[in-house]
Image (cartoon, rainbow, N blue to C red):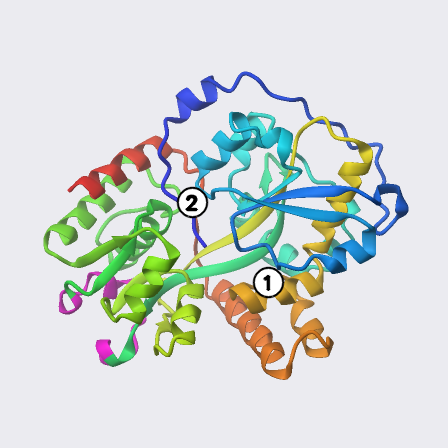
C-alpha cells in the first residue's frame, strides 16, 4: 500500500485550518489492559482498508469494548481534509494510515503523542527498535520532533512485479520499467511517492542524475525525474498509468503488461487467479514504509482514551499481526509467526505462509533502499511536476 497523489495546495489548506478541538492531556491516565475501567466503549477506527481483520472478538473479549471501522482515504490531502473539514476529528478515535504524516497532523493539533509505556506489546516488538528507532529514517514514519505519534501496525518494502514467461527470466532492477524491449508492456502507478521515488532511486543508482536523497528531493531533482518519465512516456514505454488495486491486478491477470510498478499484495492476488507473477528483488533496494495508527486529538473521556490505547496495544499483538499478515502479505510484529503456528485459528499451510511473508519482508529491510516520502519538504513542487507528467 502506498500514498495517493496529493491534489492540494498546502499553504491554503493549512491557512484555512482555524477551527480545531484541543488535545486532551493524557499524563494522568494509567492504562490497565483488559480492565473494567474502559469496558463498554466503542472505539471508532478509521482505516484505509488493509488494517481491518474483519473479526475484533479477541479485542472485545479482553476489554469489553467494541470496534467501529470507518473508511478513510490514504492520500495526505484526503486525510487532512477529512480531519479538518469532514468531521473526522469529532468522529474518529484512531486513524490507521500509511505513516510519515506527523508534521501536518501535529502542526494542526490533529493527533496526540503516544505514551508507549501504556503499550505492553510495544516493549517486546523488536521490529520497532530495529527499523523505527529514533534518529533513523524509519522513525520519521511514526515520530516527529523526537516524540512518538504513530503506532506501527505493518511494515513493508515495495518494488515491482513481472511475468517471467514474458520477460524471459529474472528481473532484478528498476531498469526493467524503462527497458525498450518491454515498450508498451509496462505500467506504473499514478503516484509520485511510489513510481516517482522508485524512478529517482533507479536514476541515482544508474548515475543518470545527481540525486542526494530520493526520499526528499530538491525542486531541481524532482524536475529531472519527471523529465525522464515524460521522455519514456512519449516513447510509448508505458501502456497505462494505473490508479486502483483492481486495475493493477487485472493488468497482470490479463497479461496486458509484463512489468509493473506495484504493491506485493497485487502479486498475491494475481497468483490466486493462476498467474505466475513474481515480485522483484531490485538491486537498487526497496521503497520502505510502515503504517501508523494515530490517536486523534479531541474532547474524549478518560474511558474512551483508555479503550483506544487498548485497541492500539491489540494492533501490536501477535494474534492481530498473524491475521493481517495472512490476509495482506505485510510484516506486522515478531510474535505473529509463532502465534500462527500454535493457534487453532490457522491451518498448517496458512501458518507457513505467515512465516514466509514475515521472513521475506524482513529481508527487504535488511537489503535496504529508501523510505517512502509522505510529506517531502518540497511537496508542492512534487505535485506540480507530477501533474506535468500526467498531462504530457
Using the rendered image of the protein, determine whether residue 285 is visible from the camera's viewpoint.
no
Does residue 244 appear left or right of residue 222 in this picture?
right
Measured along the vertical axis of the image, is residue 333 above or below residue 73? below
Coordinates of residue 84 in the picture (x, y in percent) = 53, 26
Bounds of the magenta segment: 166-182
In the image, taking residue 139 as reference, residue 41 lies left or right, namely right
Quarter of the figure with residue 13: top left
**Which residue lies under the disc numbered 1?**
324
Q: In terms of sequence position, does the residue under pointer 1 or pointer 2 come before the other?
A: 1
Mark linked to residue 298: none
Disc 2 crowd rating (10 Å Cα; few below 14, some 14-19, many 20+) is many
Badge 2 is on which residue? 373
Quadrant holding the C terminus: top left
Furthest residue in direction right, as rendered = 36
Asked if residue 390 is positioned above or below residue 57 in the image, the reply reads: above
Comparing 325 with 361, the one in front is 325
Residue 303 screen position, x and y as percent:
82, 37
Residue found 79% across the figure and 41% down from its top: 306
Q: From the viewer's perspective, is residue 128 above or below residue 76?
A: below
- Looking at the image, how many numbered discs can be counted on the residues? 2
Amino acid at each position: 500500500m502506498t500514498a495517493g497523489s496529493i491534489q492540494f495546495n498546502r499553504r491554503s489548506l493549512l491557512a484555512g485550518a482555524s477551527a480545531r478541538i484541543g488535545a486532551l492531556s493524557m499524563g494522568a491516565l494509567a492504562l490497565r489492559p483488559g480492565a473494567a475501567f474502559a469496558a463498554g466503549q466503542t472505539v471508532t477506527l478509521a482505516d484505509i482498508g488493509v488494517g481491518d481483520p474483519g473479526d475484533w472478538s479477541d479485542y472485545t473479549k479482553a476489554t469489553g469494548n467494541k470496534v467501529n471501522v470507518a473508511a478513510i482515504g490514504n492520500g495526505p490531502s484526503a486525510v487532512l481534509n477529512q480531519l479538518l473539514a469532514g468531521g473526522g476529528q469529532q468522529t474518529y478515535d484512531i486513524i490507521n494510515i500509511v505513516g510519515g504524516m506527523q508534521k501536518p497532523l501535529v502542526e494542526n493539533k490533529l493527533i496526540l503523542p503516544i505514551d508507549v509505556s501504556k503499550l505492553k506489546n510495544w516493549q517486546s516488538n523488536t521490529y520497532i527498535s530495529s527499523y523505527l528507532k529514533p534518529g533513523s529514517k524509519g522513525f520519521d514514519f511514526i515520530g516527529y520532533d523526537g516524540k512518538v505519534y504513530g503506532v506501527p501496525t505493518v511494515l513493508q518494502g515495495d518494488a515491482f512485479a513481472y511475468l517471467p514467461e514474458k520477460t524471459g527470466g529474472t528481473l532484478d532492477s528498476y531498469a526493467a520499467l524503462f527497458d525498450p524491449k518491454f515498450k508498451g508492456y509496462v505500467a506504473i502507478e499514478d503516484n509520485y511517492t511510489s513510481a516517482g521515488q522508485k524512478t529517482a532511486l533507479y536514476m541515482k543508482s544508474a548515475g543518470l542524475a545527481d540525486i542526494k536523497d530520493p526520499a526528499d528531493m530538491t525542486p531541481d531533482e524532482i524536475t529531472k525525474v519527471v523529465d525522464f518519465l515524460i521522455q519514456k512516456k512519449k516513447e510509448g514505454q508505458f501502456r497505462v498509468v494505473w490508479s486502483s488495486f483492481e486495475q493493477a491486478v487485472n493488468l497482470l491477470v490479463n497479461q496486458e503488461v509484463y512489468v509493473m510498478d506495484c504493491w506485493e499484495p497485487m502479486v498475491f492476488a494475481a497468483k490466486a487467479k493462476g498467474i505466475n507473477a513474481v515480485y522483484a528483488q531490485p538491486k537498487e533496494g526497496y521503497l520502505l514504509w510502515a503504517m501508523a495508527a494515530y490517536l486523534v486529538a479531541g474532547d474524549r473521556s478518560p474511558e474512551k482514551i483508555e479503550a483506544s490505547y487498548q485497541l492500539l496495544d491489540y494492533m501490536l499483538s501477535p494474534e492481530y499481526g498473524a491475521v493481517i499478515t495472512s490476509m495482506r502479505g505485510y510484516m506486522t510484529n515478531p510474535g505473529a509467526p509463532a502465534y500462527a503456528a500454535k493457534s487453532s485459528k490457522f491451518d498448517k499451510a496458512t501458518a507457513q505462509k505467515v512465516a514466509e511473508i514475515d521472513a521475506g519482508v524482513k529481508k527487504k529491510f535488511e537489503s535496504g533502499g529508501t523510505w517512502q516520502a509522505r510529506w517531502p519538504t518540497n511537496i508542492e513542487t512534487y505535485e506540480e511536476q507530477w501533474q506535468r507528467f500526467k498531462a504530457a
